[in-house]
Structure formats: structure tokens, C-alpha cells
């Protein structure tokens, strides 16, 4: 018998996944709002642009569901400390396996689950960074610089996240891109702007999936190509550069050695 877990993991299109979770939230009242889509888009960009070795289908599904038992009144510390664990238990009832549920449980560190899954570290970064960019009733959203400083020196100060430096590199690279708007605007600022100006979740999904994501993907691909060409050109004009990689050099030497041995025979 097919479970809900089988159903959503079998659907690899992200918009279709979002639609599935949207209707699940309407039926079961789990937590699902624009912030979930916002953070999932940041996660998507990160794993694709930085070529992170994870199961993309699985981690995007986890991103959409890991906060399923979160409540809007996050000021209640007890709820803040238990919702990830409660969410993991709920997801197990939907048919998700033990590792998937553990990944979702580790979106924050209150359950003290250890050792942590590598996917959990990615969820944690997208969740915390994305959360700081968004405005809340008690504060306005932070700019990217402030969010990255707090991510490093407050939120993750005394813990180890294996992808932190890679994530900071991704943020820095993304901040070097300009998108079209009424004026030039960075991808994170535009993502925040779309979120604040689009009240309805369905409209927000459409704008992200069919307008924002394709534009950002194109721009970052162009930027990486330019950077790669610049590095190549500089390297080609460096008289001290290594002509071959260590691996290539070893192969050449081995080939020469084998050739010499054959000649001697």
C-alpha cells in the first residue's frame, strides 16, 4: 500500500511537491506558509550552485516538511524546543523512514540528536539564514550582512556545521549578482521583496518557480562562467603555473616508465 511518503517522494517536480504539502496542510492543519517556500528556495539554490552531494529530491521534501509542527507563537520556549521532534514523529506516521525523520528532527538542535545527518546541517543553515531575512511581528528582517554575522557568531558559535563555510561562500557569490527590478537588486533582496509583496501563498509559489528561480539560475550561471574564464586567462599567462595536475603528471610518468620497460625488453 502506497504511503504519503511514497507519494510525495515519487513526485520530483518541486512545484508539484509544494502543491501536495499545501493540500496536506489544509487537511491536517500542519504548519505551511510562505516562509517554508522562501527557505526551500534558498536551500535549492545552495545545493545546486555549490554542487552539494545530497539527494536533491529527498532534501527538498524534507525542507517542505521539517517545520510541519511549528506554530506561529514561537515565543513559547517549550514549543520552540519540541516542534522539530514532534514533527519527526508525525512524519514517521506518514510513512517516512527513520533517517528522513531524523534529518527533519535535526533542523534545530533542541533534541540533541547526535551524530547529525549531513542533510540536517543544510536544513539548519537555510532555516536560520532564511528566517533572519524575513520580517516578524517583533522585528524587521535583517540584511544579508547582518544575517551572516549572526549565523556565524551567535547562532552557530559553539556548534559544528559542516557546510557553514560553503554556505557563506554561496551567500557572498549570490550577493555579487544583480537582478532586474525597478532598480538593480540582489537575489536575496528580491526574494524578500517578492515575499512581502505577495500575500497569497499560491501566487508566491508561481512567482518563485516561474519568474524568480529561472532568472537567478541564469544570472549565477553567467557569473560563474565569467569567473571561470577570468581565472583561466590569468592562469594561462602565469609562467610559474603547473602545466599538469598531480594526477595527470603521475599518469604520464607511469606511462613513460611502462614504455621504457617495454623498450628494454
Image: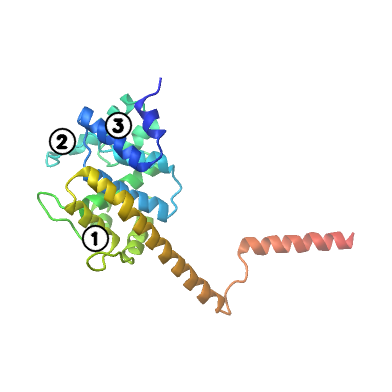
User: Residue 7: which disc?
Assistant: none
Q: Residue at x 20, y 57 (%)?
A: 193
The quadrant of the image that shows the C terminus is: bottom right
Which of labels 3 and 2 is toward the front?
Answer: 3
Q: Nearer the viewer, residue 203 or 93?
A: 203
Disc 3/disc 1 C-alpha distance (Å): 32 Å
Q: Quote the CA–CA distance across marks 2 and 1.
A: 32 Å
Callout 1 secondary element: helix
Residue 78 image label: 2
Q: How far apart are marks 3 and 2 (CA)?
A: 16 Å
* Residue at 71%, 63% in the rendered image: 252
Determine the residue located farthest toward the right in the rendered image: 265
Q: Position of residue 120 (x, y in %)?
A: 35, 42
Residue drawn at (40%, 35%), measured in percent from left and top? Answer: 11
Question: Taking 264 as reference, is 26 left or right?
Answer: left
Q: In this view, does 188 lie to the left or right of 98?
A: left
Single out the residue that lies furthest toward the left. Answer: 138
Quickly name the residue at label 1.
189
Crowdedness of circle 3 by 10 Å Cα count: few (<14), some, many (20+)?
many
Classify 10 Å Cα crowding around label 1: few (below 14), some (14-19), many (20 and above). some
Q: Can residue 163 be seen in this view?
A: no
Q: Earlier in the sequence, mark 2 or mark 1?
A: 2
Mark 3: secondary structure:
helix
Query: Dot 2: few (<14), some (14–19), or many (≥20) neighbours within 10 Å?
Result: few
Label 2 with label 1: CB-CB less than 8 Å: no
Please give the residue where the numbered disc 3 appears in the rendered image.
Answer: 88
Amino acid at each position: 500500500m502506497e504511503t504519503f511518503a511514497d507519494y510525495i517522494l515519487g513526485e520530483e517536480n518541486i512545484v508539484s511537491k509544494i502543491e501536495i504539502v499545501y493540500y496536506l496542510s489544509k487537511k491536517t492543519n500542519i504548519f505551511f506558509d510562505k516562509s517554508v517556500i522562501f527557505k526551500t528556495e534558498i536551500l535549492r539554490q545552495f545545493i545546486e550552485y555549490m554542487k552539494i552531494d545530497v539527494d536533491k529530491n529527498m532534501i527538498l521534501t524534507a525542507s517542505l516538511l521539517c517545520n510541519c509542527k511549528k506554530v506561529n507563537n514561537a515565543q513559547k520556549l517549550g514549543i520552540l524546543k519540541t516542534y522539530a521532534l514532534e514533527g519527526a514523529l508525525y512524519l514517521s506516521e506518514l510513512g517516512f523512514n527513520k533517517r528522513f525523520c531524523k534529518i527533519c528532527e535535526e533542523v534545530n538542535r533542541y533534541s540533541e540528536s547526535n551524530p547529525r545527518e549531513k542533510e540536517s546541517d543544510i536544513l539548519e543553515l537555510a532555516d536560520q539564514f532564511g528566517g533572519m531575512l524575513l520580517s516578524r511581528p517583533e522585528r524587521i528582517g535583517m540584511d544579508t550582512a547582518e544575517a551572516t554575522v549572526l549565523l556565524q557568531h551567535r547562532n552557530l558559535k559553539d556548534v559544528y556545521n559542516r557546510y557553514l563555510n560553503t554556505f557563506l561562500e554561496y551567500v557572498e557569490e549570490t550577493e555579487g549578482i544583480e537582478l532586474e527590478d525597478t532598480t538593480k537588486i540582489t537575489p536575496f533582496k528580491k526574494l524578500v521583496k517578492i515575499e512581502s509583496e505577495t500575500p497569497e501563498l499560491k501566487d508566491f509559489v508561481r512567482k518563485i518557480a516561474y519568474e524568480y528561480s529561472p532568472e537567478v539560475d541564469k544570472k549565477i550561471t553567467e557569473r560563474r562562467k565569467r569567473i571561470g574564464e577570468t581565472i583561466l586567462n590569468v592562469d594561462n599567462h602565469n609562467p610559474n603555473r603547473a602545466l599538469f595536475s598531480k594526477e595527470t603528471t603521475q599518469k604520464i610518468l607511469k606511462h613513460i616508465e611502462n614504455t621504457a620497460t617495454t623498450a628494454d625488453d
